Amino acid sequence: MNNIMNINGHKALIQYDPETELLRGEFIGLNGGADFYADNVADLHKEGAVSLQTYLDVCRERGIGPYKHYSGRFNVRISPQIHAAAAAAAAASNISLNEWVAQTLNRAVRG
């Protein structure tokens, strides 16, 4: 099941909220919260568009950058066994561990 909805070029994570018995959407990659609720997919899409536009308007009015900045760097903690296996896979591909991880992540997020 794909829990990502694209609304006006922005991705939102969709989950069921058992407390409200509604579908809840939350945009990914924003500096602040822009969540939205509905009881069906069509209305969820409409509410998401309204929520996103409201968020962007407020950011513009306040002079706030609406999007998170990603540096392209992050640390990941894995077991020594996985680290060794990844290093071996990178060496077998004749590329650096960093490049192997980048390629593997790229395949996973595009797949």
Image (tube, grey):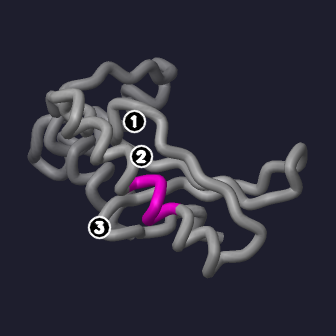
Q: Residue at x 34, y 42 (%)?
A: 29
Disc 2 from disc 1: Cα separation? 31 Å
Asked where in the image residue 97 lies, by quadrant, the reply is top left
Check disc 2 and report the residue beneath it.
Answer: 28
Q: Which mark, residue 9?
A: 3
Q: Which mark, residue 85?
A: 1
Extreme-bottom residue of the structure? 42
For marks 2 and 1, give the one nearer the viewer: 2
Mark 3 nearby-residue class (10 Å; few <14, some 14–19, many ≥20): few
Percent position of residue 71, x then y:
15, 28
- Which is nearer the N-term, disc 2 or disc 1? 2
Prevailing SS of the magenta stretch = helix
- Bounds of the magenta segment: 48-52
Q: Residue at x 39, y 50 (%)?
A: 54
Element marked by disc 1: helix
Residue 14 is a magenta residue: no
Q: Residue at x 50, y 62 (%)?
A: 48
Percent position of residue 6, x then y:
41, 69
Q: Residue at x 53, y 72 (%)?
A: 46
Disc 2 from disc 3: Cα separation? 11 Å
Percent position of residue 2, x then y:
58, 69
Q: Are marks 2 and 3 in contact (CB under 8 Å)?
A: no
- Which is nearer the N-term, disc 2 or disc 3? 3
Q: Amino acid at mark 3?
A: Gly
Percent position of residue 37, x then y:
67, 57
